[in-house]
Image (spheres, rainbow, N blue to C red):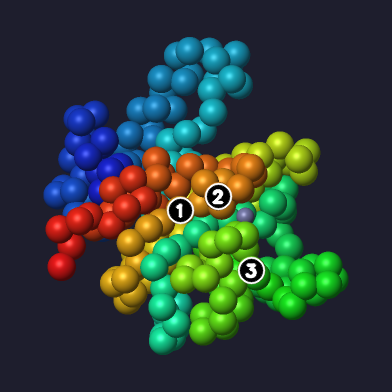
Amino acid sequence: MYVEKYQRQLHLQGYDPGKPDGDFGPKTCKAAMNALVKAGRKDNQLGKKALANSPPPVKRRLKSASTAKPRKIKIPVTSRSISEIIWHCAATPEGRSIGNNPAATIDRWHKERGWSGIGYHAVVDLDGRIYPGRDWSKTGAHAKGHNRGSLGFAYVGGVAKDGRTAKDTRTPDQRASMLWLSEAVTAKYPNIHRLTGHSQYANKACPSFHVPDDEIGNIPGFKQGHRNKNHG
Ligand SMILES: [Zn+2]
């Protein structure tokens, strides 16, 4: 998706990345290199000061565009009736890892609080890897009054580096995997008719973005977090 967008952008800027097919092939690579070189020249003309102040957006965009691919898992099957996915954040500081298996870490945290273990059914790490949490056949413990009939997913992050201020800290890899997970699960569970975030049910910022306005709430077949009515 990102590559395709970038290809369209290159085309608009007068380069020839070939067809916008989402593939980072030789043509796209050449066009991207030309765009990078030109951007570099422009910076030089603007002088050292401007160069120091100018972020390297082209390079960074190029990297995320070519590497942000979802890390897929096998979607568990359960006979439990599921009608909703509720998104959360782990409320951990931006960019900070919480271990090699974040689901295991959260499981430990929740047990230390005297709970029965991780309340989420899956956790998406900073690099987009998806880790299984609570068994999907078991009711979660993540959104008071809304655990029955739902799956709770969380991503690592959700607060700024100060450890307090709510912030949408999702990395491009996390976004890709969260989007993929939402699509794959709703495809496998046709009774899911809502995609929401914790903040819609509690006076909390979690997951630090508003799901109905996010790409997650508007995956194919959904609009503003609701399954399209004409869905078969
Ligand atoms: Zn939450």
Question: Does residue 130 appear in the picture of this structure?
Answer: no
Residue indicated by mark 3:
141
Q: Name the residue under label 1.
A: 196
Whether disc 3's CB lies below 8 Å from ligand 1 is answered no
Dot 2: few (<14), some (14–19), or many (≥20) neighbours within 10 Å? Answer: some
| Horizontal side, residue 178 vs residue 17: left or right | right
Dot 2 amino acid type: Tyr
Q: What element carries label 3?
A: loop
- Residue under the point 48% across and 42% down: 210
Q: Earlier in the sequence, mark 3 or mark 1?
A: 3
Between the residue at mark 3 and the residue at mark 1, the CA separation in whole angstroms equals 15 Å
**Residue at left offset 56%, top offset 46%:** 199
Q: Tell me: 200 left or right of 81.
A: right
Measured along the vertical axis of the image, is residue 131 above or below residue 45? below
In the image, is the residue at mark 2 within 8 Å of ligand 1 by its beta carbon?
no
**Dot placed on the residue nearer the N-terminal end, 2 or 1:** 1
Q: Which quadrant of the figure has residue 134?
A: bottom right
Which kind of residue does numbered mark 3 sit on? Ala
Mark nearer the viewer, 2 or 1: 2
Question: Can you tell which quarter of the image residue 185 is in?
Answer: bottom left
Mark-to-mark CA distance, 3 and 2: 13 Å
Q: Position of residue 103 (x, y in %)?
A: 66, 72
Q: Residue furthest front?
A: 145
Disc 1 is placed on an element classified as strand
> Where ligand 1 lies, by image quadrant?
bottom right
Do the residues under discs 2 and 1 have CB atoms within 8 angstroms?
Answer: yes
Report how many numbered discs are placed on residues in the image: 3
Q: Nearer the viewer, residue 38 or 164?
A: 164
In the displayed structure image, the side of residue 161 where residue 47 appears, left or right: left
Badge 1, how many Cα within 10 Å: few under 14, some, many 20+?
Answer: many
- Rendering coords of residue 118 (x, y %): 68, 73
**Which mark is drawn over residue 201?**
2
